[in-house]
Amino acid sequence: MPETQRELRLEDIENRFGLRVKSHRIGEMDIKVAEVDRVDEMVCEIYPEAVTTHGDAPVWMITWPASFGLAEYLLHSQSVEGLKILELGCGTAATGIALAKGGADVICTDYDPLALTLARFNAKLNRCSSISIRLLDWYKPDLNESFDLVVGSEVVYFEKSYLPLVSVLKHYARSDGKIFLSDQQRPQMSSFIKLCSREGFDNHQFDQMVYLPEKNQPIRITVLNRTRGPEPTEANKANNFRL
């Protein structure tokens, strides 16, 4: 069985590829996240084709600036206390951990079991005993819950996953809930937003700066609201006319 299909122990990851811990402050909150130190070595050994089982890139090993930026925006713009939140493609779980420390009921999900191993460690590192870490495959989603907020950082980059991702957003966000996605100004977001519009989502976007020790990083936050049904296809229009 390929190593990406089983959960390596955290000790295995640390011994073979190293771990480093970084801190990020959000107001009075201090978030600590461990991430893989020698990413290139891990990709070569664990993902020899440089892709995951679904064919996309293994990007869970580090904490992306957009993760911190999304957490900052959500914690500064509203109270998340008591909200039920789903994090998609959590990776190191930085966003979910910050929201849990802010009082939210958070389920952090990823489909790579190695990412979940690191996410669980980071939850313990931040003493987030109430946070839930779960496997979620967008191609075979199996959660039977709905959420006030659905969030994800750097999850829009692989075109094959766009339709499954939209399906997951429609399924898990409550009808009056909101979806927040953050990214590092990636061009792929444009085509994804067009798909979301066809599927009945309104959206607005804005830029935000994330202040990091190494450099300041501009990111984009996309807010989606489901306000209508999907636009009919030409085939559906013809069928409706005949009816």
Image (cartoon, grey):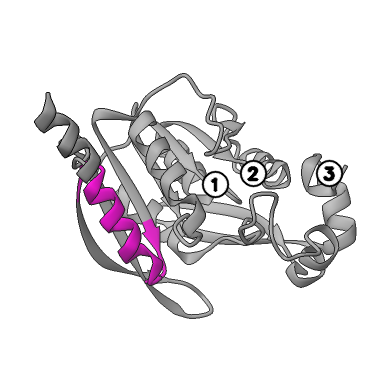
Question: Would you identify the image quadrant in which residue 210 lies?
Answer: bottom left
Q: Nearer the viewer, mark 1 or mark 2?
A: 1
> With 186 as the anchor, is 8 left or right in this view?
right
Q: Which residue is mark 2?
A: 119
Name the one closer to the observer, 130 or 134.
Answer: 134
Quarter of the figure with the C terminus? top left
Q: Amino acid at mark 2?
A: Ala
Cβ–Cβ under 8 Å for marks 1 and 2 = yes
Q: Amino acid at mark 3?
A: Leu
Q: Is residue 191 magenta?
A: yes
Toward the bottom, the furthest residue is: 215
Name the one closer to the observer, 203 or 159.
Answer: 159
Gap between marks 1 and 2 measured at Cα: 8 Å
Q: Which residues are magenta?
A: 182-202
Q: Amino acid at mark 1?
A: Cys
In the image, residue 136 above or below residue 144: below
Q: Which mark is residue 8?
A: 3
